[in-house]
Amino acid sequence: MKTVVIATNNKGKLQEFKSLFPNVNIKGLADLGFTDTIIEDGNTFKENALIKARKIAKAYNSIVIADDSGLEVKALNGEPGIKSARYASEHNDALNNEQLIKNLNGITDRRARFVCALCIYFPNDDYRLVEEYCYGLIVDEAKGSNGFGYDPHFYSLDLHKTLAEASMNEKNKISHRAKALRKLKELLNEDFSLK
């Protein structure tokens, strides 16, 4: 079974990848003991995904999939955007959600989308980038206990519930990350070589 490194320590993301790639040995950064800081100084989700994937692939001479994802709210000019994980100045889901709802106070246009840029990077420096979206509305009241990040406040227009109320199976059908992974899988053979 081929091993593919997912450039994250986020357990929620790792579970999503494992559920979508059942025939691949998925490892996270914690499994490798990787503790270096990766400076994500790109201006787009795609640039940050490439930065992460390249660094880990070089460090471990391995196939790496890295994502950069976040929430873009139309009325906030795309915020929190690439700063989604640290919107409230630190990596804390509760504080980020609090900041989001505060910034949307009095705003009726709640249209938003989750964005996921995925990069697969090979030891020979070949790589591919894809990007996908999940559309919805931001709701003031958090609902559901599944998911992570902004999921309790993101009402899916496809599922008619927040992503935190959705099962993993439901989420995998419509989420930005699942769509990006499916797009990425279309580029790959079963052995992770490129078509």
Image: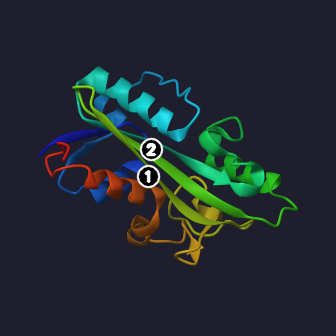
Query: Which residue of the protein is positioned furthest toward the front in this rendering?
Result: 195
Question: In the rendered view, does 127 fall on the left or right side of 148?
Answer: left
Residue 10 shows which numbered tag?
2
In the image shown, does 187 or 108 lie closer to the viewer?
Answer: 187
Discs 2, 1 touching: Cβ within 8 Å: yes
In the image shown, does 167 or 21 lie closer to the viewer?
Answer: 21
| Residue at left offset 53%, top offset 28% | 40
Q: Is residue 151 above or below residue 170?
A: above
Secondary element at image label 2? loop
Residue 92 point in image, percent of width and height:
63, 43
| Residue at left offset 30%, top offset 59% | 19
| Residue at left offset 68%, top offset 45% | 80
Residue 12 shows which numbered tag?
1
| Residue at left offset 48%, top offset 23% | 37
**Disc 2 residue crowd, few under 14, some 14–19, many 20+, Cα 10 Å:** few
Residue 115 shows which numbered tag?
none
Residue 194 point in image, percent of width and height:
20, 43
Residue 127 point in image, percent of width and height:
31, 35
Q: Is residue 46 above or below residue 62?
A: below
In the image shown, does 86 or 179 lie closer to the viewer?
Answer: 179
Secondary element at image label 1? helix
Q: Amino acid at mark 2?
A: Asn
